[in-house]
Image (cartoon, grey):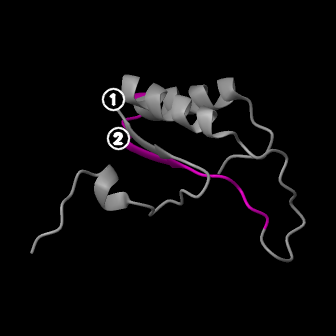
Amino acid sequence: MLGFGETEEEVFEVLKDAAEAGVKFFTMGQYLKPPGSTLEVVEYVPLDRYQRFTEYGKTLGMSVQASPLTRSSYLADRLAGYTKRP
């Protein structure tokens, strides 16, 4: 989840560390405060930043799905390269 005040450089570092640890698939989405939560949104991450994270992940050999509404299972079949069988 993004939007807690993390810097772009911190996210790049996490992606690099994940790739070095053998991670192949990585998803990132916007934190949205659920009802009753006391944890506030610090920032709504701009779309171009999600694109930079996706592109950087590709340079590290990972499949990255990053967008404001991405959740851990969002388009998981496409991220993993699976196709539906008839």
Residue 46: image quadrant is top right
Percent x, y for residue 30?
67, 52
Disc 2, disc 1: CB below 8 Å? yes
Amino acid type shown at disc 1:
Gly
Q: Of the residues under marks 2 and 1, which one precedes in the sequence?
A: 2
Determine the residue positioned at 60% across, 52% down. 29
Determine the residue positioned at 82% across, 76% down. 35
Q: Secondary structure at mark 2?
A: loop
Residue 60 at least partly seen: no
Magenta-highlighted residues: 20-33
Percent x, y for residue 3?
75, 46
Residue 6 vs residue 48: left or right? right
Residue 56 vs residue 83: left or right? right
**Is the stretch drawn in magenta largely helix, strand or loop?**
loop
The C terminus, quarter of image: bottom left
Residue 7 vs residue 38: left or right? left
